[in-house]
Image (cartoon, coloured by chain):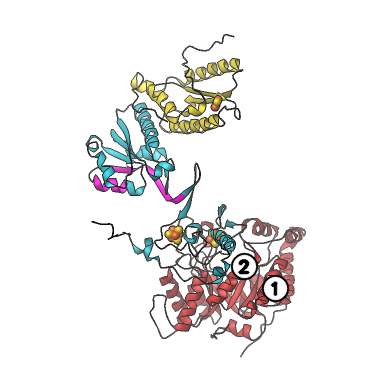
Amino acid sequence: MSVTTPSKLQKMIASGNFAVTSEVGPPRSADGAVIEHKGNLIKDYVDAINVTDNQTSVCRVCSLACCIRLKLMGLEPCLQMVTRDRNCIALQSDILGAASFGIHNILCLTGDHQHFGDHPKCANVFDLDSIQLIQTVKMMRDEGKLLGGHEFAVRPQMFIGAAANPFAGPNVAMRVSRLAKKVAAGVQFIQTQCIYNLDKFKEFMKLMVDRGLHEKVAILAGITPMKNVGMAKYMQKRVPGMDVPDDIIRRIGGVPKEKQAEEGITLAVEQIQELKEVEGVRGFHIMAIEWEEKVQEIVERGGLYPRPQLA
Amino acid sequence: MRLQYPPSVRIIEVPCTGKVDIMHLLMAFEYGADGVIVMGCLEGDCHYGAGNLYAKKRGNRVKEILDKVGVGGERLAMYNLTSGMGGRFAEIIREITEKVMELGPSPIRVATGKAVRPIAEVTT
Amino acid sequence: MIKAVPKPLEEVLDLVKDFTKVLIVGCDGCVTVCEAGGSKEAKVLASALRLYFTQAGKQAQIDETSLTRQCEKEYLAQLSDKMDAYDAVVSLACGCGVQYMAEMYNNKIIYPGVDTCFLGVNEERGLYAERCQACGRCILAETGGVCPIARCSKRMLNGPCGGSDQGKCEISKDVPCGWELIYERLKTLGQLDRFEKPVDPKDWTTSRDGGPRTIVREDLRI
Ligand code: SF4
Ligand code: SF4
Ligand code: FES
């Protein structure tokens, strides 16, 4: 985590407090008020707000525009950026644009294949992958250089993040290896895939700690509350790389329908409590998918409120 | 045993249905056949292993072609029998002949008033 | 080799339905191996077209032939005395052959009879799979002999992504994850050390991004 940026998220992590981030999904229309509303809902409960970049390959208002809007509201956005839709000219251009508005957090992703989304027939780009995007942001920030070689004076001050999925194939050891590769590329913080299999996550963190990787990168544990048993089953069966153990399904499914949402929140809160004890966990990334109004409750009940005020 | 089946049927013997090529079937229709039946051994009982399975796939492909070119895939039928099922053999031929009678003459014969001259030479 | 599939018959019928003299030209190269466009397919297509025209009560002359390769002038030239007799030609070669024929017979209507798909292998008869995207600068030496460009759905050079699940790619349970294959092969070869070294962005100029490509081999040209 060597390079220091003006990022408030970076400061929070450096302070030793658990950091809290959350995400908002832009609308599928030109309605700018949606992001404003979602931002206002969660702003007092998180240190930075991710804006997803056409998540699951569904076309939405662009992440950059929403991040600028949040920034103008005085909030701390984190620009999610996938390499699926833009070549390195467009990616770097958006990074410069974000930085020009004082956006200081970026999450470098490859992105879901467009096959999942609302434009399955479109072409994809994948000029870079997530690791190469990390390298690129780092080079722009630390060397003031573009991939094409052009050098410039005003550099983007980006706190560089990426995702990690401890539950994807082929095994936990390789997932640690790949994260080591992201660290080698220059990543500073990680927001993980939603964690439901805590044993497997702990195994992952143990390997991270054994290699000392937890000191080189801040791990924010991914938390997604289940709205109902249908969602839990869908995540288990349909989302590639998602690991939802059967006892979670049984637990959510074991309460009456109208209580399931509450049970999902309680589960998320318990997960936070348990994960706080795991060595190397430096904070939480709460992805309340189209359920932003619940972030407040999760943060409060998770003992993460009030957010510390740093100078 | 003497089996009664309609005289309009012409039997072409092949060593195995695996020998029946797509082109044989298409050519039969080009010549003006109103219907074609491919009769092979029971599935799993082909003397050469899987000849009848190949024949089935080819038959399906030809049916699809016949449908698309306006001749009609229902004019081609495929059956699996053993040599001991002579009665069934005659019965199938009667059934299919009836069905083809119902369908009427092949559109190829209707259009030309006769069988067409074969153009392609069949090699497999 | 190049892999192709026959175009749906109705598509070809639609292309040629207004002509009366049509030549079908097969290619004895790659498309013969995947049984999409060889002399056999040419015969089948010609027969189907004859049936179609005949039942429609239309007098038409549909013939077929096949060439050793349609991506070479010498073989295409063999058609020169035939061409005048036809209104249209359906080429069953890959897209290269179709275009080369059209270049040589500039005033003739030449239609494609197959859909050209990819560079791949014959896994079994009737089962063909992509292996290479002709990127122009082969990196198989670094990736355990498995191509990340052709076999990762996101052509990642630093995979696998987080969607890799039980050896399968996130796009489908029928698609093996190319990066799991790379990882396993590197492991088998004792080269896992490669895996943790970030691979720099690829220079795509030698791929399609650099524009139409030409190879000039001065050592071979006269
Ligand atoms: S690296 Fe390039 S040339 Fe080599 S197999 Fe892959 S696409 Fe083909
Ligand atoms: S699952 Fe594997 S093959 Fe599919 S996109 Fe991810 S890394 Fe590539
Ligand atoms: S021997 Fe092959 S089908 Fe009878």
Q: Quadrant of residue A243?
A: bottom right
Q: Residue furthest front?
A: C219
- The colour of chain A is red
Colour yellow belongs to chain:
B
Report the side of C62 relative to C125 (left or right).
left
In this orientation, does residue B38 appear?
yes
Relative depth, front residue between A171 and A105: A171
Q: Which of the image's four quarters has the C terminus of chain C? A: bottom left
Relative depth, front residue between A85 and A226: A85
- The colour of chain C is cyan
In this orientation, does residue A37 appear?
no
Taking the spot 49% from the left edge, 27% from the top edge, the residue there is B74
What residue does disc 2 label? A175
Report the side of B65 relative to A117 (left or right).
left
> Is ligand 2 closer than 8 angstroms to the Cβ of mark 1?
no
What residue does disc 1 label? A206
Q: Which residues are magenta?
A: C98-120
Amino acid bearing label 1: Lys
Mark 2 on the same chain as mark 1: yes
Taking the spot 26% from the left edge, 40% from the top edge, the residue there is C78
Chain hosting mark 1: A
Taking the spot 39% from the left edge, 75% from the top edge, the residue there is A148
Does A214 sit above or below residue C99? Answer: below
